Image: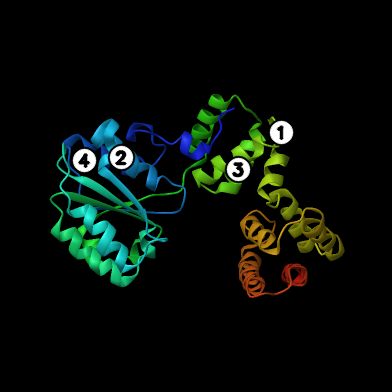
Amino acid sequence: MTKGIWAEIYRPHSLKEVVNQVHVVERLKSFVKEGEIPHMIFAGPAGTGKTTCAIATAMDLFGENWKEYFQETNASDERGIDTIRMRIKEYARTKPIGTKFKIVFLDESDALTKDAQNSLRRIMEKYTNVTRFIFSCNYSSRLIPPIQSRCSLFRFKLLSKNDTFTYLGRIIKGERLNVSEGALGAIYTICEGDLRKATNVLQACTSFDKKITEELVYEIASRAKPADVKVMMELALAGNFAASRKKLQDLLFMQGLSGEDVIREMHRQLDDVKADERTKAELVAKVGEYEYRISQGGNDLVQLEALLAQLMLCAKR
């Protein structure tokens, strides 16, 4: 079995290998074909391929020596104006040898301070003939308008189930793993379109057992099983509060789940519970209220039992 982090080992080395994000990849391929790219913003949820696309673009543009023309900086760690004025400016102003331009990749760039972003705006303008900037962020709106106006925006979306299974299939084949269909479904439910998280969960499971099952996935990820939470909610809605409360205590004490894990899974299950639309609307409001209480330090057991009581009362009304 391969040693190391699989999310890095199985990362695509070309835009042709990137899973999903067709709307992004096709535009990037056209830039690579012309041998020219603009300043760019890659915006979207975590684990959807933003860093991968930046590195794959550099590999396709510069070939084997891509690292000589590509600088990656995590803006959440080095977010101050001094980093921009010293490290990034010194790199950006240097003319590359053997290529027209080089790339500065700023990961988590929405964490940059406003002063740092304003300083960066001038650097982008001054050295655009020798340096291109790629900003990776979860929220493009947190970048100042002058930077947004200088860049081409690419929005990344969460991966579909089929694309997630296709990518995990490469790893399963390469590592010769024994993974059940239920386990793959559980991984997708847990990762919610985050491919990096899905890969890490799969790798974590292999350290415990050679045969990866649905039960093992939920145990390793420390997540509530959707079926258990759904049963708990349906018992409360049916008026069987004692059985619903016992199921909750089993989730918290026997399975060792946190209150936040349980209430988030309750929110996911709201669409599938047997109730009319008005009742579901009331339940959404109640789940939001009690999730806030728990986040503010409320006791998990007390708040979740109170929520189950509210579920039963809503159903009776």
Quickly name the residue at label 4: 31
Quickly name the residue at label 3: 201
Quickly name the residue at label 2: 67
- Nearer to us: label 4 or label 3: 3
First in sequence, mark 1 or 3: give its number. Answer: 3
Instruction: Using a 10 Å C-alpha cutoff, classify the residue at mark 2 as few (fewer than 14 neighbours), some (14 to 19) or many (20 or more).
Output: some
Left or right: where 36 falls relative to 5: left
Q: Residues under labels 2 and 1: Cα distance?
A: 37 Å
Answer above or below: position of 305 versus 230. Answer: below
Q: Residues under labels 4 and 2: Cα distance?
A: 19 Å
First in sequence, mark 2 or 1: give its number. Answer: 2
Name the element at disc 2: helix
Look at the numbered discs 4 and 2 and tell me whether their residues touch, using CB distance below 8 Å: no
Q: Residues under labels 1 and 3: Cα distance?
A: 13 Å
First in sequence, mark 4 or 3: give its number. Answer: 4
Left or right: where 171 falls relative to 139: right
- Nearer to us: label 2 or label 1: 2
Q: Residue at x 63, y 75 (%)?
A: 296
- Nearer to us: label 4 or label 2: 2
Quickly name the residue at label 1: 209
- Residue 88 place in picture, x, y as percent: 26, 57
Instruction: Using a 10 Å C-alpha cutoff, classify the residue at mark 3 as few (fewer than 14 neighbours), some (14 to 19) or many (20 or more).
Output: some
The quadrant in which residue 120 appears is: bottom left
Name the element at disc 3: helix
Q: Quadrant of the C terminus?
A: bottom right
Identify the amino acid type marked 1: Asp
